[in-house]
Amino acid sequence: MLTGDQSLASATIVGAGCAGLSMAYRLQTRGIRPLVVVDPGDPRPDHIWAYWDDGGEDLSLARDLTEGQWKKWEIVNENERVCLEGDYFFYRAISSERFEAHLGGSMPQVERVQTRVTSVDRSSGIYILKLESGKELQSKHVFDSRPFIVPKGAFLQHFLGWRVRTDKPTFDENIATLMDFRVSQEAGIHFIYLLPFSSTEALVESTVFSFKSLPDSWYERQIKDYLSTKYPKSSLKTVSSEKGIIPLISVRDEHSFGTPIGVRAGALRASSGYAFSQIQRQIFQILDESRIGSSGFYKIPRPKVGCNKIESWMDTVLLRVLQETPESASSIFVQLASSLDGDSFARFMRGHGDWLGRLRLMKSLPLAPFWKSALRGEIT
């Protein structure tokens, strides 16, 4: 291990999740060495990560690992169905386990250290990382991708999903269902998210926006009811399951070890919980705008957050309206989708979209609750 006074890492990445491994991989491809990734090695259950892809270079690696892709996506409630189609954008899905394993296996020259970083000091321009193992690691720079601490009382997106297979063609594999609100609303803003990987296999998630997560049995019952109602003639088998909790808040952690990256650097989109493509774009931006010399980094830009200031404000207002009037959620999301074409919708969801799309969104929303919320303070 690069410890003690004899060795010095060019960069150390704290955390080996999506952001940390992506940064290590991109640094390696740019010839920056030696590199170290420090992570305790806690189990990381497999999840499906989905994102809108415009064909940019920042998503080239993920594109090669795609498990499913769709040019059409829909939002449905009791009264209306809006189906959008992208001209330039695909909605894609990848396995987190497969993505991280691919990155890990593609970095033979990156040293992996399985422990926790307890603190970081800086002396004469050198970072000194104190490790839980009792050792120290010296590095010219540190990128911090550790998970952030979710504040108490945060508005949450919580879900449980099943990957299911059927005995005969059942799903429309050409359309991703982003939100189907034709389910119970007893426990919060609830919808089904369905990604058909083929006509006989799909990920089906019961997703809720509220302040408190629910027992696994609750989501499982919702999925069973939905599948039996919508596909009564198909016999389904559960292949795997996943669950998670995503805070619907704007994150900007100022107490990081070195330069924050990923969710702790604001890559999470507050109104939707999307982060994957935002993380990839952020890492490309950091490296493209950095100045790197023989002595390491001597100029690193502020990481680009998941959306611009106008979109962040729109997210804040939307989330407040959803908290105050959850019964209006399904109609709001249908109106949002119906106001845009497929590419404008994808640009807005990915963040840093176009002005015309933002104006159409604002015009589509009910004025009274949104202006009322817009004039109030930030969501805590």
Image (cartoon, rainbow, N blue to C red):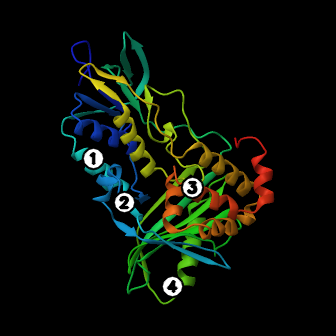
- The Cα atoms of the two marked residues, 2 and 4, are separated by 25 Å
Tell me the residue at 54%/49% (across/down): 269
- The Cα atoms of the two marked residues, 3 and 2, are separated by 18 Å
What residue is pinned by disc 3? 272
Q: Find numbered disc 4 in the image and state the secondary structure of the residue it sits on.
A: loop
Q: Position of residue 319 (x, y in %)?
A: 68, 52
What residue is pinned by disc 4? 231
Q: Position of residue 37 (x, y in %)?
A: 31, 33
Amino acid at the residue labelled 1: Leu
Q: Residue 93 is drawn in which quadrant?
A: bottom left
Amino acid at the residue labelled 3: Ser
Amino acid at the residue labelled 2: Ile
Residue furthest to the top in view is: 124
- Packing grade of label 3 (10 A; few <14, some 14-19, many >=20) is some
Q: Is residue 42 visible?
A: no
In-image side of 103 versus 219 (left or right)? left
Residue furthest to the front in view is: 356
Between tags 4 and 1, which lies in front? 1
Q: In front here: 196 or 369?
A: 369
What residue is pinned by disc 1? 103
Does label 3 or label 4 sit earlier along the sequence? 4
Q: Find numbered disc 1 in the image and state the secondary structure of the residue it sits on.
A: helix
Q: In front here: 238 or 153?
A: 153
- The Cα atoms of the two marked residues, 3 and 4, are separated by 27 Å
- The Cα atoms of the two marked residues, 3 and 1, are separated by 26 Å
Does label 3 or label 1 sit earlier along the sequence? 1
Q: Which mark is residue 30?
A: none
Q: Position of residue 344 (x, y in %)?
A: 52, 62
What residue is pinned by disc 2? 94
Q: Is residue 250 visible?
A: yes
Disc 1, disc 2: CB below 8 Å? no
